[in-house]
Image (cartoon, rainbow, N blue to C red):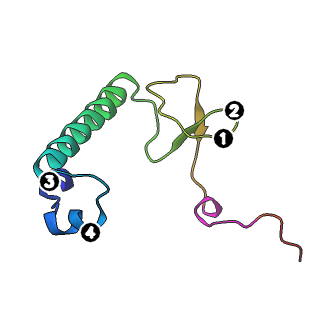
Amino acid sequence: MMRRFARIEPGRLEEIQARALDPVTLKMAWIAMSDEAEAQMTRLADDRPDLPIGVAFVDESGCPGWIGDNPSLHLHAPTPRGCWPRIHGLER
């Protein structure tokens, strides 16, 4: 739903652009990318109904990826502590 009603204001683009951006072209590209992502998620859900919802998939080093592109990724379930940032290297 968001992809259809997202607004791209030409005035705002002028403030941040490093090159000429066409809001109509940008919106069309956004819709195409969104449609493709939705199709991939639907296809994966249909092919692998056993996969849980609301999880991430990571490689051996913990880097996230798309399970549809790399079936060797493993499940990384969310935890309450997982959503809080951590600062490493501070002495107490």
User: What is the chief secondary structure element of the magenta stretch?
Assistant: loop
Q: Nearer the viewer, mark 3 or mark 2?
A: 3
Residue farthest along the right direction in this orientation: 92
Closer to the camera in the image, 84 or 7: 7
Q: Secondary structure at mark 3?
A: helix
The answer to whether residue 22 is magenta is no
Q: Which mark is residue 31?
A: none
Displayed quadrant of residue 32: top left
Amino acid type at image mark 1 = Gly
The reply, left or right, for residue 80 in relation to residue 35 is: right
Q: Are marks 4 and 1 in contact (CB under 8 Å)?
A: no
Q: Can you tell which of label 2 and label 4 is closer to the viewer?
A: 4
Residue 75 is drawn in which quadrant? top right
Mark 4 to mark 1 CA distance (whole Å): 37 Å
Residue 43: where, in percent of width, then height? 30, 26
Verify CB contact (< 8 Å) between mark 2 and mark 4.
no
Task: Point out which mark residue 23 bears.
Answer: 3
Q: Amino acid at mark 3?
A: Pro
The extreme bottom residue here reads 92
Q: Which residue is mark 1?
A: 62
Q: CA distance from mark 2 to mark 4?
A: 41 Å
- Are dots 1 and 3 in contact, CB under 8 Å? no
Q: Amino acid at mark 4?
A: Glu
The disc placed on residue 60 is 2
Q: Amino acid at mark 2?
A: Glu
Residue indicated by mark 4: 15
**Which percent across, then down, holds residue 29?**
20, 41
Q: Is residue 39 above or below residue 4?
A: above
Question: Going from the N terminus, do you reach mark 3 or mark 2 first?
Answer: 3
Mark 4 lies on a secondary structure that is helix
Q: Earlier in the sequence, mark 4 or mark 1?
A: 4
Between the residue at mark 2 and the residue at mark 1, the CA separation in whole angstroms equals 6 Å
